[in-house]
């Protein structure tokens, strides 16, 4: 980003960045009677560099320079495996795991010394994970139960970022190379019922995450960006809890008319029972689709409920509920063995003014939008 030619800025700033990645992937598939499996090898190297240079109004004065990603090299190598075994016509067992080695090296570690004196220049982490699930079918019913365990290494910004501005909560963020691995424990379950005309499925999962990584306000240091309201440093919470639930259904009203609907709900709290950020409120979607020969028409309504479990401490505010109505139609035809699809539609028909829980600064989403398209496949 280069804003040195914008006259309205109090401080001109260049913020170039580079990320270079290369790696390899190798996979072996296994099959024997009722057994299916695979073994996969994955390795990569990434170099992340980002700079920040501030120019004073008087260009004869000295400029300020910093590495916001201080030449951070990441190397990873891991082996993963997934397996499924058909116990009977009604049941199946799935299981798998991963073992990875994650290595970081910071060329200019002195930027991390300012907030974390004595920070090591390199760090190696072991990242294990394991998962298993059981599926059982009984006539038109289907059930699944599963569990998982895994480690996650901090990202480059979480570990080594230096004054990275977040316009969502207006804080500058500082990385911490000494962060512990996030350790996740998961349980999940689903239940479904399906006929030729009707289907309904409920899914739920629960995560207990030790050493959850999140930004906390620091007393040390002052903001670098003139728009910032403070400085946050990435830290490990003792734990966090996240619960997700979804309900999906469809019904064939007529031979050419189908209804689909879904409801999702999520809840997240930290170790102090405070709300976690970026957790979507109750949301819904319902749609009708009509098909006749090469013609298809759709109409849908979707929206979010009022976000009441927001997190002021992490920069969120209350987001009102909204409802969006969309409609479209398409026609498929052929010309000289080419398949064409002509489509037209309207998004946000009622021109609703809204923003979602995840929109930075409550910037509104797109209003009414009329579109047409022509697609073709060889």
Image (cartoon, helix red, strand yellow):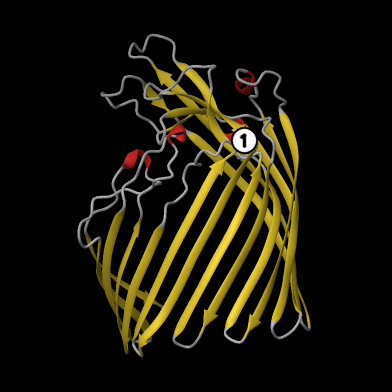
Left or right: 14, with 111 as reference point:
left
Q: Nearer the viewer, residue 58 or 297?
A: 297
Compared to 319, does 330 lie above or below?
A: below
Give the side of residue 33 with respect to residue 255, left or right. Answer: right
Residue 291 appearing in the image:
yes
Frontmost residue, 256 versus 136: 136
The picture quadrant where one finds residue 53 is top left
Q: Give percent across and percent down for residue 253.
A: 35, 85
The residue sitting at 44% across, 51% down in the picture is 280
Q: Is residue 316 above or below residue 164?
A: below
Q: Residue at x 61, y 87 (%)?
A: 139
Q: Does residue 70 show up?
A: no
Residues packed near mark 1 inside 10 Å, few (<14), some (14 to 19) or many (20 plus): some
Residue sitting at x 27%, y 53% = 366
Location of residue 20 in the rendering, given as x and y in whole percent from the top left corner: 58, 43
Above or below 111: residue 276 = below
Residue 228, image quadrant: top left
Name the residue carrying label 1.
237
**How many numbered marks appear?**
1
Q: Residue 114: x percent and y percent?
A: 60, 17
Residue occupying the far top of the picture: 61
Q: In the structure shown, which secondary structural element does the residue marked by tag 1 occupy? A: loop
Side (left or right) of 193 relative to 78: left
* Residue at the spot 38% in from the left edge and 21% down from the top edge: 226
> Based on the displayed image, in which of its 4 quarters is residue 177 positioned?
top right
* Residue 305 image point, x, y percent: 36, 54
Q: Quadrant of the C terminus?
A: bottom left
Q: Residue furthest front?
A: 273
Q: Quadrant of the N terminus?
A: top left
């Amino acid at each position: 980003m280069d804003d040195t030619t914008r006259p309205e800025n109090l401080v001109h700033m260049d913020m170039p960045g580079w990320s270079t990645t290369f790696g390899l992937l190798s996979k072996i598939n296994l099959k024997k009677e009722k057994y299916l499996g695979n073994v996969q090898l994955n390795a990569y190297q990434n170099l992340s560099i980002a700079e920040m240079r501030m120019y004073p109004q008087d260009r004869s004065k000295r400029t300020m320079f910093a590495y916001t990603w201080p030449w951070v090299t990441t190397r990873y190598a891991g082996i993963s495996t997934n397996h499924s075994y058909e116990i009977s016509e009604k049941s199946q067992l799935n299981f798998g795991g991963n073992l990875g080695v994650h290595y970081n090296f910071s060329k200019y570690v002195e930027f991390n010394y300012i907030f974390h004196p004595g920070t090591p220049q390199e760090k190696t982490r072991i990242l294990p994970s394991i998962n298993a699930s059981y599926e059982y079918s009984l006539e038109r019913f289907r059930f699944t139960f599963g569990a998982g365990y895994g480690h996650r290494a901090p990202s480059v910004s979480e570990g080594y970022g230096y004054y990275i501005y977040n316009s969502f909560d207006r804080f500058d963020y500082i990385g911490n190379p000494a962060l512990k691995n996030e350790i996740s424990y998961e349980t999940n379950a689903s239940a479904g019922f399906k006929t030729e005309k009707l289907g309904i499925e409920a899914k739920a999962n629960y995560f207990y995450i030790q050493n959850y990584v999140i930004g906390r306000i620091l007393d040390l240091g002052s903001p670098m960006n003139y728009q910032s309201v403070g400085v946050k440093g990435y830290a490990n919470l003792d734990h966090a809890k996240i619960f997700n639930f979804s309900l999906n259904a469809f019904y064939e009203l007529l031979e050419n008319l189908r209804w689909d609907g879904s409801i999702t709900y999520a809840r997240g709290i930290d170790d102090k029972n405070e709300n976690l950020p970026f957790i979507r409120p109750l949301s819904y979607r319902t749609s009708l689709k009509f098909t006749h020969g090469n013609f298809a028409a759709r109409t849908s309504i979707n929206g979010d409920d009022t976000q009441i479990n927001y997190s002021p401490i992490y920069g969120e505010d209350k987001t009102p509920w909204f409802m969006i109505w969309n409609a479209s139609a398409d026609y498929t035809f052929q010309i000289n063995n080419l398949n064409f699809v002509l489509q037209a539609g309207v998004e946000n028909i009622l021109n609703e003014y809204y923003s979602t829980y995840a929109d930075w600064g409550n910037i509104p989403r797109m209003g009414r939008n009329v579109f047409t398209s022509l697609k073709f496949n060889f």
